[in-house]
Amino acid sequence: MSDWTLCIDFGTAFSKAAVAPAGAWSRFDPATIRPLMLSTEGQNAFLLDSAVFVDEDRVLFGRAALNEADAQADSKRAALRSFKTLLSVSDLDRALNTNAPLTIDPHRVFQMRDLIVLYLAYLLASVDRAIAADAALAQGARFSRRYAAPAWRSGDSAGMHDVIVRLFGEAEAFRAAIGKRILSPDGLSLRTISDALPKATEQAEALEMGLIYEATAAAAYTSVGLDGAGSHMIVVDMGAGTTDIAALARLGPRTIELPEARVTLKQAGDFIDRIIANRVLETAKWAKRDAERSELWSVLMSQMADIKEAIMADGRATLRNQGRSITLALKDVEKDVDFRDFQKSLREAYDHALAVVRDDARARGRSEVQAIAVGGGAATPFIQDLIRRKMESTRPRVIPRPATPDWAHAREFRGNLAPVFPQLAIAIGGALAPDSMLAVRSGFSRPANDRSGTQAELD
Amino acid sequence: MSAGKKKTKGPKVAARKRAAQGVSLTDALAEAAWSEADIALAQALADFDEIETAQKKGARKDAFERLGQALSRASRKRGLSRLGDLDDEVEFDAEAHDLNAAVAKTPKSVRIQARGVTRGGEVLIKPRVTPADKKRS
C-alpha cells in the first residue's frame, strides 16, 4: 500500500509532477497537495524544460539543452522538444524507431526512442531529487505512480500505454545505471550513453504506472472536495496545437470517457497567434519591406503570450516596435474570417459533445453537467462564453466551473498557488484522482472508453 | 567562506542550494508566482517613466495605455480580479463599497468610480463609489 500518489505530466514545453496523499480524494485537504520542485534553474522551480540537446560530445537536458540550442541556432542545430506530440502519433512504434533528424542529432547515432528514454531518465531523476528535498516526502515514503496524457486519438489506449510504460522502464533502468550524473548541468558524454543505454534497454522491465487522461485530471481537481460533485462533465482544452473537447461520466466507482463526444479541432492557441500577428501586420502600414515585416513578425511572436493575454483579458493590447505604438483590439481579431470560422466550428463541436453528455446524464437520471475550460486558452472570453451559455432546456443543468478551483486560493498557500495553478493543474489533478478515474491502472491495461461490464442503468 | 567559493555563487548555484536545503513549498510557490508578475511590474515602472518624460500628447497616451496593460498583467499573474464595472450605477452598500465623497446623507444609488479588486473569494479593495446624482470624478 503506498502512502502517496505521484502524477507526472510531461507537457509540450515543460514537465511537471505533483504528489497527494493516498486517499486524498475522499479526505481532501488542500494543504497536503505537494507540487514537486523539479527544476533548480530559473525562478519557477516547478517547471522542468522538456528538452534534449545532442552536442558535439555530450547530451544536455532541460534548461542547459535549451541554452546550448540557442547558442548554436545559427548552425541549424535544435533541441528535441514536443515529446508529447511524438507520443500521441497513431503509429508510435514507427515514430520511435525513426532516426532523429540531423538538426537534432548531427552524429546520426540516436533514434527518437533513445532520446525520449534519455529525457525520461532525466525527468525521473529530477522527480527523485525533488522528493529527497521535500521534508514531508523524503522519509522513506512509498509512491504509486501515474502519468497524464491526452486521450490517444487512435483509440488504442491500452496499446499506447504499454509502449509508454516500457519507455519509462528503460528510462528507469538507465537512470539506475547512471545515478545522479544525469542531473549535471554538463549532461552526459556520448560515450557514457553508448556504454550504458543498450544494456539498460535490454534489462529493462515496464514501469508500474497508471494512465490518467488530462480531461479526467481536470475533472478531478475541479470536483475534489465538492459536496455532490456532478457525475458528468464536459471539458474544453485549448492548448497550443489543438482544441480538444471531451466528456466524462462517473458510473458507480468508475469514470469513463464518452468517446462519441470527443472532438479535436486543429485550430488552437498557435492558430490565434497567427491571426493576431497577421492583423498587426495589416495595421502596420509603415512596415512595407520584407525585412521590416519579418522583423515585426519576430517581435510579435516573441511577445505573443503577453499580447494575446492582454487582447483576450482587457479587450486590447498595445505594443511598441521601433518607437511606434501599435494597438490591436479584440474586435479586430473577431472580424477575421478564419477566426470566425474557428469560433463556429468550436461552437458546433461543443454543442455536439454537450448533447452527448447531457443525453447520458438524462438517461441515468442525473440533473447536472459540469463544464470546465482548461489549458492555455481556458481564460479566453469566447471559451468562457461557451461554457457559460444558457441552455434552452433546463435539465440537466450545465454548471460552469472556474479554471482555477476555489480550493487553490486556500489560506495555507498565501495566495501563491492560484497564480501558478494553471501550469500545474494536470499534475495536481492526476495525483488527486482516485484509481477508479484512471484510464489504465498500473498492473493491468484497460482503456478508459472500454465500457464492457458497465450496466446502462440509473446510478 | 573563501573568496574562490564566493566567485561561483550565481543564481544557478543559489537555486541548486535552495533545492538541496529543502526550501519550503510555500516559498517556492511564492517565488514562482511572483516571477512573471515581477517582469510585468518592472515594465510598468519603465512605462511610468515614459509618461513623465513624454514630449507629445500622443506618446503620453500610448505610454499610459502600456502602463495599464502592464499593471493588468501583473495583477493577473498574482491571481487578482476586478470587481464591478466602471460607471455602473448600483445600490449603495456600506459593507461592499468605499464611498469616495463627503455626504450629509447616505446615498441610495452610487456610481462605480474605481473597480474593486479580489483574489479568490477575498475582497482586497472595495469598489470606490460616488453618489450617482452628483457624478463627481
Image (tube, grey):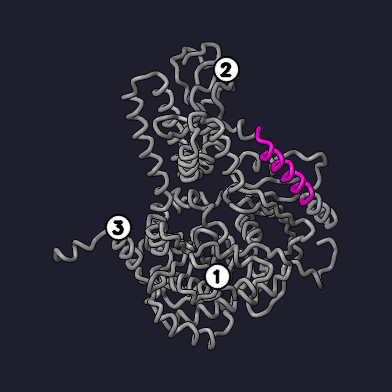
Residue at 53%, 72% (x, y): give it: A116
Tell me the CA gap for discs 1 and 3.
32 Å
- Tell me the chain of label 1: A
Q: Which residues are magenta?
A: A335-353
Residue at label 3? B11
Q: Secondary structure at mark 1?
A: strand
Residue at label 2? B108
Identity of the residue furthest to the left in this view? B3
Residue type pointed to by label 2: Lys
Q: Main secondary structure of the magenta part?
A: helix
Tell me the CA gap for discs 1 and 2.
55 Å
Q: Position of residue A53 (x, y in %)?
A: 44, 67
Q: Secondary structure at mark 3?
A: helix
A326 horizontally vs A278: left or right: left
Vertical relation: B78 (above or below) A259: above
- Tell me the chain of label 2: B
Which residue occupies the foreground of this view, B118 or A160? A160
On the question of residue B121 being in view, the answer is yes
Q: Position of residue A254 (x, y in %)?
A: 72, 67
Quadrant for the C terminus of chain A, please.
bottom right
B104 horizontally vs B133: left or right: left
Which residue occupies the foreground of this view, B6 or B122? B6
**Dot 2 surroundings within 10 Å: few (below 14), some, or many (20 or more)?**
few
Residue type pointed to by label 3: Pro
**Dot 1 surroundings within 10 Å: few (below 14), some, or many (20 or more)?**
many
Residue at label 1? A5
